[in-house]
């Protein structure tokens, strides 16, 4: 049995509402990056964690701390989600830091099957991030304007 952890992008999950449903579906169906495991070998999803967000100088250290939450449960492989694969400019640094800290754990860049090109995915995600939206400040100011 292969024990797998998935590392997702904080921006995608926290800001854009990704539920990792595509990653989990392809894990169960052994599609995308999960096709590399032999069909007769059972897969066990140990857990899903988020990256620490776009890093500062402490990015890799924060990531290692989060990954320890998986390594305590004997993971064999950590898959970087498709959103990290397509969007994260730090994925290679993260993979290197993980490989150095946990040499027995396989690092795989990718999870679910790609349905659009990474370029198109990045374009669409950027559009999501850049659309105007109201914040608490807007509500407070709107309410303040309504008060005589």
Image (cartoon, helix red, strand yellow):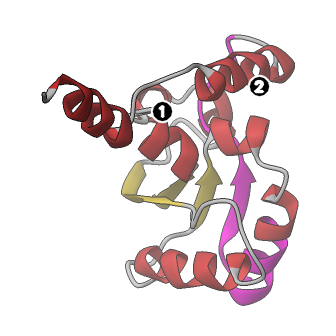
Q: Which residue is the site of mark 1?
A: 16
* The C terminus lies in quadrant: top left
Q: 115 left or right of 27?
A: right
Q: 96 left or right of 113?
A: right
Residue 120 placement: quadrant? top right
SS at badge 1: loop
Outermost front residue: 148
Which residue range is magenta in the image?
Answer: 95-115
Q: Residue at x 49, y 47 (%)?
A: 41
Q: Nearer the N terminus, badge 2 or badge 1?
A: 1
Q: Residue at x 72, y 53 (%)?
A: 108
**How busy is the neighbourhood of tag 1: few (under 14 within 10 Å), some, or many (20 plus)?**
few
**How busy is the neighbourhood of tag 2: few (under 14 within 10 Å), some, or many (20 plus)?**
some
SS at badge 2: helix
Q: Nearer the viewer, residue 126 or 143?
A: 143
Q: 129 left or right of 141?
A: right
Q: Which residue is the site of mark 2?
A: 122
Please provide percent x and percent y for residue 70: 44, 74
Disc 2 to disc 1, C-alpha distance: 13 Å
Q: 72 left or right of 11?
A: left
Please provide percent x and percent y for residue 17: 40, 33
Residue 132 placement: quadrant? top right
Outermost left residue: 148
Please provide percent x and percent y for residue 79: 62, 52
Looking at the picture, does residue 106 appear above or below residue 27?
Answer: below
Q: Does the segment drawn in magenta span residue 111?
A: yes
Residue 136 placement: quadrant? top left
Q: Residue at x 70, y 83 (%)?
A: 58
* The N terminus lies in quadrant: bottom left
Q: Does the segment drawn in magenta span residue 56?
A: no
Looking at the picture, does residue 89 appear above or below residue 132?
Answer: below
Q: Residue at x 32, y 35 (%)?
A: 141
């Amino acid at each position: 049995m292969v024990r797998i952890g998935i590392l997702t992008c904080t921006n995608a999950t926290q800001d854009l509402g990704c539920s990792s449903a595509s990653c989990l579906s392809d894990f169960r169906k052994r599609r995308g990056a999960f096709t590399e495991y032999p069909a007769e070998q059972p897969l066990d999803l140990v857990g899903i964690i988020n990256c620490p967000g776009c890093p500062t100088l402490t990015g890799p250290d924060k990531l290692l701390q989060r990954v320890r939450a998986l390594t305590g449960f004997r993971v064999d492989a950590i898959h970087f989600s498709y959103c990290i694969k397509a969007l994260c400019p730090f994925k290679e640094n993260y993979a290197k830091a993980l490989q150095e800290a946990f040499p027995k754990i396989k690092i795989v860049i990718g999870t679910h099957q790609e349905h659009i090109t990474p370029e198109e995915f990045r374009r669409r995600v950027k559009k999501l991030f850049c659309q105007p939206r109201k914040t608490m400040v807007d509500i407070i100011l709107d309410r303040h304007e309504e008060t005589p």
